[in-house]
Image (cartoon, rainbow, N blue to C red):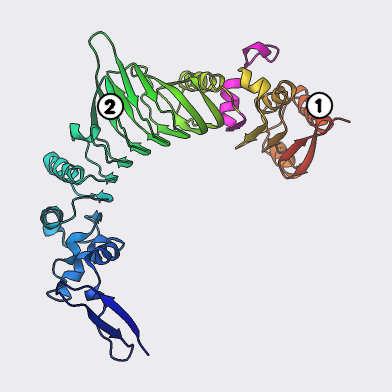
Amino acid sequence: MGTQFLIDSNQSKKRRITYDENNGEDIISYLPECITSRILSRLPTKDALRTCVLSKDWEHKWTGIYNIDIDDDMRFVLKKTRKTSFINFVDRIFFLSRNSTLKRFSLRCHLEYKAHRMISWISAALMRNVADLEIVYHDDDVVLPARLFSCTSLTTMKLKWPCFFRVSYQNLFSSLKSLYLDRTKFLGECVPGTRKLVFDFPVLETLELQNCEWLKVNLVEINAPALSMFKVICYSYLLEVDKCQIKFSKAKLVKCEFVGRFVEDFDFSATSVFSATIDFRSYYNDDIHLIRKIGLQAGLLFKGFCGLNHLKISGKVVEWCWDDYDYDEVESLPSCIVSHLKEVRFRSFSESLPDYRMAQFLWTNALRLKKIVGLRRESSEERQRKKIFGQVREESEEKEIENFWAKLKTVFKHKEHGIFVKRKKR
């Protein structure tokens, strides 16, 4: 026996339709419009639009979708007509769409479009109270519309786009929970006599900045009481531009991650950081002045954390920050290292003297340290290989390293490869 459905039609009577696998009756066409829209919204947008050719009844059903995800590289194959066809395609979606609210609008463009065209598409999405906005584009000659800052429906925004943010002194994103910006340029319209910007994010939880630039700005204050994750990635060579300090306040960060090299100074004095990862990078053609400058940035960042429990650092950070460090000056350490730090992870332990000295310094002075991860010792084969290539340490260095491992065994127990756990006091 087939399955029975009761379906409300536009007519006054209810129609009872019985579906049997053998007779192949059409049931989905009689589903309520809200259910049809939900089904089509879960499909890729191009597939949802293709349903218009099924029958006359399906010609306009796609106009009720609330998720729009489009890419100019996937739909149109002919290069001569691809650009024009894509513009007409997107314009048609917004013109015919019957849904006053969009949950998601994702636009990926590989071709070049005029600035007013991009702004018109973004504005159309904002007028429909879009909640999740994603733009992937390469052109750097677009200034984002001002209404973006007053949009109260946005909860997620992801821009992989070297566009311009023309921001005023104070900026409020009342509903934004997740923000990802890649290659964004901030143009500050600050109060006369100041070069300061203030961003208020009452409910922001995650913030990721990648290769962003701050123009005509010296200080950026971020008020985000709900912020739990902050990540910044920067591979910029623009280390000679004006310094910009980014200050966080009212936040309790669970996770903080820094990768690359930085123009900005970060101030965490008014917030707490539970776990941090620092992975600063240098390149083969960097001169010693540049490397020392990056090392200074790493050192200032490291000493600025408050309430730190977990720290993950790269070998380069150790080399830059601790090569000439005065290991007798415990007072110069941030208090969180002495009284809170429980675990240290080396991402790439290079077995250089700065690595060994820093590891020993931490287990000696970090009173609550329980675990060190990433320590490794050269195998006999590796030492033999270095001898062949003339990479031999001085006798004093070898002696210092041997003493390191001897002392380590008295304080920590080797659990497994690269992991050492502090011995319990008897």
Q: Of all residues shown, which one is farthest toward the front? A: 12
Residue 207 vertical position relative to residue 305 in the rendered view, above or below: below
Q: Say if the magenta span includes residue 322.
A: yes
Q: Which residues are magenta?
A: 309-333
Residue 77 visible in the picture: no
- The image shows residue 178 at horizontal and vertical percentages of 38, 39
Look at discs 1 and 2 and give the one toward the viewer: 2
In front here: 350 or 172?
Answer: 172
Q: Is residue 334 magenta?
A: no
The image position of residue 96, as x and y in percent, is 11, 57
**Exactly how many numbered labels are in the figure?**
2
Is residue 362 rendered to the left or right of residue 213? Answer: right
Give the image location of residue 2, x and y in percent. 35, 87
Q: Secondary structure at mark 1?
A: helix
Please indicate, yes or no, whether residue 25 appears anywhere in the rendered image. yes
Please, what is the three-letter code of the amino acid marked with disc 2? Phe
Q: Earlier in the sequence, mark 1 or mark 2?
A: 2
Of the 4 image quadrants, the one containing the N terminus is bottom left
| Residue 186 - label | 2
Q: Quadrant of residue 339?
A: top right
Q: Residue at x 43, y 26 (%)?
A: 262
Q: Is residue 296 left or right of residue 11?
A: right
Q: Is residue 139 above or below residue 214?
A: below
Gap in angstroms between the C-alphas marked 1 and 2: 51 Å
Q: Name the one closer to the observer, 412 or 67.
A: 67
